[in-house]
Amino acid sequence: MALELRQQLKLSQQLVMTPQLQQAIKLLQLSTLELSDVVQQEIEQNPLLEEDTNTPDSHHESLHEVMGEAPPPEEPSPLLDRTAEVSMDDNAGLKEIDWSNYENEYETPSSFRERDDGDMSSSLDILTKKTSLEDHLLWQLKFNELTEEEERVGIFIIGNLNRDGFLQVDEADIIAETNSSPVTVQWLLALIQDMDPSGVGARNLKESLLLQLSHLSLSDSTASLLVRDYMHFLETRNYAGIAKASKLPMKEILTAVELITGLNPHPGRAFADDEAHFITPDIYVYKMDGEYVIQLNDDGLPRLKISNFYKDILKDHKDIPVASVNETKGYIQEKLRSAMWLIKSIQQRQRTIYKVVESLVKFQLDFFEKGPTFLKPLILRDVADDIEMHESTVSRVTTNKYVHTPQGIYELKYFFNSSIGRYDGEEDMASESIKVKMRQVFQDENSEKPLSDMALSKLFAKENIKIARRTVAKYREQLGILPAKFRKKPAISRR
């Protein structure tokens, strides 16, 4: 078959997402805090975008311009005709401020400070960095009179502790990396294991617990015996096996177990730099006069407007060199279109979120009235059909967003649940409602006779709830609850 070159004409359809559409989709799935950061970046990059602190409805005015509609008439204001120009020569007001003492004198109202106190500390003086586990141990290491080699070995050991305080390298690796003798390495390791927090520097959980018991002068106690010889029984809570193997009374074993459970399995976690992340709701749902009111959280979200200064330049061609009129005009027009589209996308995002939450309130009205046990089965398609949008749009809206309700703060995804059938033909229940019931059953159960998954399935069957044993096990694992054999606590009187 001969090879040849030929031209061929082909007609096809292709879906292409414009940059503006990609931006609108990106904004839709951002939380309020993330959107605020994106808007701030756009303000910095686009000179035509400004934050409007004077006109509360600036969003709507910009939207009128985008849609080609005439904005409502308003009185001309000299303050808004043009972006204010600041003259750096006029520094009379700046000279009156004592900048060297600014944080003490001007950061809070004068009524709360005594300005004549020259020794008053600033709020900047109390800003501190949280001490890490490594810094805490190095600080203790300095109190020992060590040689240069010993200090190097100690620093190496401390540097190889994980966030739980456990040693991640073997003694052979320490010896090879530091070129030290085994005696020196063992002595430094014992020195670090004797430091605060108790149990740090251990190779595993068993050694850490033994170190903590030793620091409590309980090396010869029953608790140490259980950790040293019966750790595998402790892991499975097989206290009967411990009693059979050790010939100890059950009461003594349970007393020792109570002591062991009071120890810290992660001694280094107290110095971890984990910070609490507080949730800021994106939407608020209030009940007022018997009706639910939806309010979007716009706190921290800048209100945008188009700079009148650049609009005047584009309109009258003022302050533009004749040689670069077309180039400058094209640049301003491009930035104007980008700013208009951003404002329009934010408005569209807010309207979409409102519609989705409004639909959720309608479908899950019993939840807002009575609580989580009254959640109903709901899928994305239900809400999408209700608001006449695509499921992917609803999915993006409900991603990483939280709503403040009379029942608490919940992620929007929380309201979508699979259904659990009923035996008597009643309305299906939401899976989240079943989990709430399960958690309550586990809290109220007899610790000496915990319910198995099958027993819990039969218990729900008595309430006309059709749920299989494997589904009970699945939900139990999602709730972080151990199986029945691990939850069982033996009676004190048993021997």
Image (tube, grey):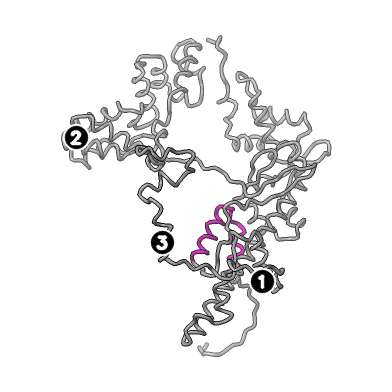
Q: Are marks 2 and 1 in contact (CB under 8 Å)?
A: no
Closer to the camera in the image, 272 or 226: 272
Q: Is residue 102 visible?
A: yes
Q: Where's residue 49, x and y in %?
A: 55, 67
Please name the residue that numbered disc 1 is placed on: 65
Q: Residue furthest right?
A: 425
Q: Which residue is mark 2?
A: 150
Q: Residues within 10 Å of mark 3 (few under 14, many from 20)?
A: few
- Can you give x and y, in whole percent of width and height, for residue 170 in the image? 29, 37
The three-letter code of the residue at mark 1 reads Glu
Return the disc, 2 or 3, that comes first in the chain's sequence: 3
Q: Is residue 429 visible?
A: no
Q: Which residues are magenta?
A: 22-44
Which residue sits at x=47%, y=11%? Answer: 252
Three-letter amino acid code of the residue under disc 3: Asn
SS at mark 3 in the image: loop
**As rendered, which of 248 and 12 lies closer to the eye?**
12
